[in-house]
Amino acid sequence: MSERAVLHVKGRILVGPDEVRDELWVVGGRISYDRPAGARDIRTVDGWVLPGLVDAHCHVGLDRHGAVPEDVAEKQALTDRDAGALLLRDAGSPSDTRWTDDRDDLPKIIRAGRHIARTRRYIRNYAWEIEPDDLVAYVAQEARRGDGWVKLVGDWIDRDLGDLSACWPRGAVEAAIAEAHRLGARVTAHCFAEDSLRDLVEAGIDCVEHATGLTDDTIPLFAERGVAIVPTLVNIATFPALADGGESKFPRWSAHMRRLHERRYDTVRSAHDAGIPVFVGTDAGGTLPHGLAADEVAELAKAGIPPVEALAAGTWAARKWLGRPGLEEGAPADLVVYGSDPRADVRVLTDPRRVVLNGRVVG
């Protein structure tokens, strides 16, 4: 397309859940709701239009063994892009993926630096593995390296205990979260179990990943403090297989994982009903493939979140939470076109008609 080429997008433009326009124009890679004067080389696409989907918990540059080469990371990002996920919050990776920022054909990534875990209390080759006395220093380091987020591993299996348990003492997380906030970063934490949640929330954490351990005791606390959760239900679906694999060595842990899985939908629905912000994330890049954001929206709806709110959790609301624009005037033209109304049936998200990134039709 030439410098004066224009993309005309028409149909039903879902600027918000209740704000619908008939058309928009893409000029110089950005959105305009005014027809540009003197436009030529106009290309038209039409359908139901959403801002690019958000996967607020994935891992570009990571697989089950650790860091991956750039060509593999590129394929991961392209898979997300082609599925319509154009904004990714990378919730921890040992890879340096800043080279993707120079690629206008790859999704935009908000990085949380590298995971920070307790020694021998996480997946090998994933995290900085440290002791509590070093937590503040490592949080400061990752706050400076990331894009406004830091990722802690809040709990993991304790092999001596034979079950999930909290990784950090209360004082250490209080000091670490305070330091991250001083440096302008928000903090999130991987948490499967129940016993780390109160300390993390009362210490000022901003988000919890998975949050399968939420109970009637901690849900009100999350709601009161406005702490978001990213449930990653497509990942929680793997718990039974994990439990089967660990049954002989860690039966207590296996039983715990099965209980967390069995009540996963009730947990998410109760969190939403209490007013806890819930956002879409898949945990892709560890053991799960990329490109599952649409499946996670469907899982949130299956859990009992109203379909339009499940859709917002992966589009309008998620972008606002992450401080990135949607389909506003002058915003980068990152959008996805569908054949029918995704508000009526979120399963439509699995079949994008067109993907537009930085104003270019890329899929």
Image (spheres, rainbow, N blue to C red):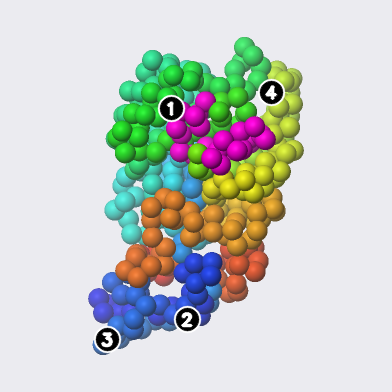
Task: Compare marks 3 and 2 and give the one earlier in the sequence.
Answer: 2
Q: Is residue 44 magenta?
A: no
Quarter of the figure with residue 193:
top right
Compute the Cα span from label 3 to label 2: 19 Å
Q: Which residue is mark 2?
A: 22
Quick one: label 4 or label 1, which is nearer the N terminus?
Answer: 1
Q: CA distance from mark 4 to mark 1?
A: 22 Å
User: Residue at 53% across / 56% down in the picture?
Assistant: 314
Spot occupied by residue 319 in the image (x, y as percentages of width and height): 44, 55
Residue 322 visible at all: yes
Q: Dot 4: within a 10 Å radius of its alpha carbon, few (fewer than 14), some, or many (20 or more) residues? A: many
Type of amino acid at the residue the image marks with label 1: Ile
Q: Nearer the viewer, mark 2 or mark 4?
A: 2
The residue carrying mark 3 is 37
Does the magenta-highlighted stretch encompass residue 204? yes
**Closer to the camera in the image, 245 or 38:** 38
Q: Which residue is mark 1?
A: 116
Asked if marks 2 and 4 touch (Cβ < 8 Å), the reply is no
- In the image, 17 versus 109, the foreground residue is 17
Q: Residue 63 at x, y = what percent?
A: 50, 38
Q: Which of the two discs, 4 and 3, labels the residue nearer the N terminus?
A: 3
Of the image marks 1 and 2, the number of the one nearer the N terminus: 2
Identity, as a three-letter code, of the amino acid under mark 3: Ala
Q: Answer yes or no: is residue 213 visible.
A: no
Q: Secondary structure at mark 2?
A: strand
